[in-house]
Image (cartoon, rainbow, N blue to C red):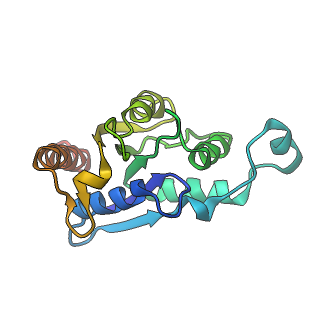
Amino acid sequence: MKILAFAASNSKNSINKTFVTSVSKYYKEADDVIDILDLNDFEMPLYSIDREIESGIPQLALDFAAKIDEADFLLISIAEYNGSYNVGYKNIIDWVSRISGRKTFNGKPVFLLATSPGPMGGSTVLATAVNRIAWDGAEVLDSFSLPQFGSNFEAGKGVTNIEYRSKLEAKVRATKRALKEKATPLG
């Protein structure tokens, strides 16, 4: 299985990137490949219809779409900025959504995550993403929010709060089962 993981953030020190990288390790099995993207590698001009008419779709948007298309499963940790998406992520999604003949996520199964330093754990933007991303062609398998990242996560250990770790691991097991069921032909 090829797994594409990324933080929906363009912060170089994104806690969501740290979080999604840690969670991706739960999915690593013998033949699996995990590709962890940095959205800074896909920085493009701000989307506008005028720019699209003048210059077309940027190659980086096509490259990002190709990464999605090559994956069997997506892990996305959504950063919350003032209750909404990070502008870097939103801009990439805006450009990819303009590629003719496709939905942004092209039917890919997705496990959505979020974390933040505060007590809400990015839950506002996560709720938006869960409701929105299906319209963009994703199959949301589950979602998980980790509040107070600095208190509940430790590098090298992952989620350290036992209650949150148990909830996360239960959701990981459920998404793995769902992925196996999708891969098993009916017979």
Quadrant location of the C terminus in the rendered image: top left
Q: Reply above or below: 95 against 83.
A: below
The tally of labels here is 0
Q: Which residue is nearer to you in this view: 89 or 160?
A: 160
Q: Reply above or below: 37 against 95.
A: below
Residue 74 makes an appearance in the image: yes
Residue 11 coordinates in the image, percent (x, y): 53, 58
- Measuring 15% from the left and 42% from the top, which residue is drawn there? 167
* Left or right position of 144 against 52: left
Quadrant location of the N terminus in the rendered image: bottom left
* Left or right position of 137 against 87: left
Residue 69 coordinates in the image, percent (x, y): 49, 54
* Left or right position of 179 against 90: left
- Measuring 10% from the left and 49% from the top, which residue is drawn there? 162
- Residue 27 position by quadrant: bottom left
Residue 57 coordinates in the image, percent (x, y): 75, 50
